[in-house]
Image: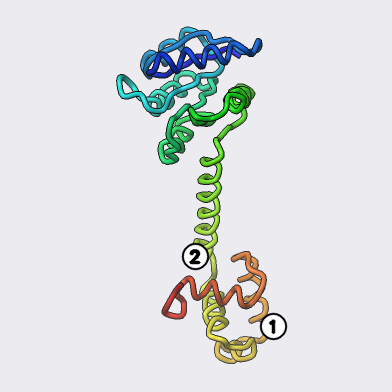
């Protein structure tokens, strides 16, 4: 593994280099103190892993450098190194092409594992970032579920509202002037589209959507 270290602290780079050199499969081919220098050295030295500090106040920061380097060198794997678990910037870095992120306070063996992971082309996130990513994913799933309401037909929306108001299938059929079997079909389609399994879940969904004039 050919590794380039980009960090504005010489002591940090020195410590990382000493650590990585204990692994015979890892070679530190270069160092840089800010983003611009990191990009230039990466293009020249052709590392397959760049360990990039996120916060570098002098010169180009790690977020900008990551995005620009991936545009010029798509094949390189970038591991973000940061002192603080600031998920907003970490996710922006990943969107910019970083393969993962790790805290500077992480144990040495975790850092080595992270570098090995991104070198293989895998992703790596430190635990707190994994938790935040999962939370955002679940929030997205929930939002997607809410958005499926727009996929319902007008008749299905009417049936959903009447179910939520407590009407039986027979009463819904009478009110909409359709057969009970048709009501049951609409109810089945509702459950499939909204990925719900029971009538109470349909009622809860309708309440959350404000179909009864109020929400929770």
Q: Name above or below for residue 100 compared with residue 188.
A: above
Q: Residues within 10 Å of mark 1 (few under 14, many from 20)?
A: few
Asked whether 5 or 105 is in front, the reply is 105
Q: Which residue is mark 1?
A: 181
Query: By what rule are the colours in the image chosen?
Result: rainbow
Residue at x 46% of width, y 35% of height? 95
Circles 1, 2 touching at the beta carbon (< 8 Å)? no
Considering the numbered disc 1 on the image, is that residue within a helix, a strand or a loop?
helix
- Does residue 216 appear left or right of residue 35 in this picture? right
| Image location (x, y in percent) of residue 164 | 54, 81
Outermost residue, left side: 58
**Quarter residue 195 falls in:** bottom right
Asked whether 186 or 142 is in front, the reply is 142
Which numbered tag is attached to residue 150? 2
Residue at x 46% of width, y 15% of height? 13
Considering the numbered disc 2 on the image, is that residue within a helix, a strand or a loop?
helix
Q: Name above or below for residue 60 compared with residue 87.
A: above
Task: Count the numbered circles shown.
Answer: 2
- Does residue 35 appear left or right of residue 102 in this picture? left
Quarter the N terminus occupies:
top right
Residue at x 31% of width, y 24% of height? 57
Q: Residues within 10 Å of mark 2 (few under 14, many from 20)?
A: few
Asked whether 75 or 177 is in front, the reply is 75
| Image location (x, y in percent) of residue 189 | 64, 70
| Image location (x, y in percent) of residue 206 | 52, 74
Residue at x 49% of width, y 31% of height? 103
How far apart in space, not on screen, are marks 1 and 2 (Cα)?
24 Å
């Amino acid at each position: 593994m050919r590794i380039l270290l980009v960090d504005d602290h010489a002591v940090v780079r020195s410590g990382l280099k000493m650590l990585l050199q204990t692994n015979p499969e890892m070679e530190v081919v270069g160092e840089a103190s800010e983003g611009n220098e990191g990009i230039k050295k990466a293009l020249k030295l052709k590392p397959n892993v760049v360990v990039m500090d996120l916060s570098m106040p002098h010169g180009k920061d790690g977020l900008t450098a990551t995005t620009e380097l991936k545009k010029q060198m798509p094949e390189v794997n970038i591991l973000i190194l940061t002192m603080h678990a600031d998920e907003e910037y970490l996710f922006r870095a990943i969107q910019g092409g970083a393969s993962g992120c790790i805290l500077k306070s992480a144990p040495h063996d975790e850092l080595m594992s992270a570098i090995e992971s991104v070198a293989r082309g895998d992703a790596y996130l430190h635990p707190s970032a994994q938790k935040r990513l999962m939370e955002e994913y679940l929030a997205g799933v929930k939002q997607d579920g809410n958005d499926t309401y727009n996929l319902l037909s007008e008749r299905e929306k009417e049936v959903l509202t009447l179910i939520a108001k407590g009407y039986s299938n027979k009463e819904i059929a009478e009110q909409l002037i359709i057969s009970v079997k048709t009501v049951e079909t609409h109810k089945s389609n509702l459950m499939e589209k909204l990925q719900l399994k029971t009538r109470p879940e349909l009622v809860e969904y309708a309440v959350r959507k404000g179909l009864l004039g109020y929400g929770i």
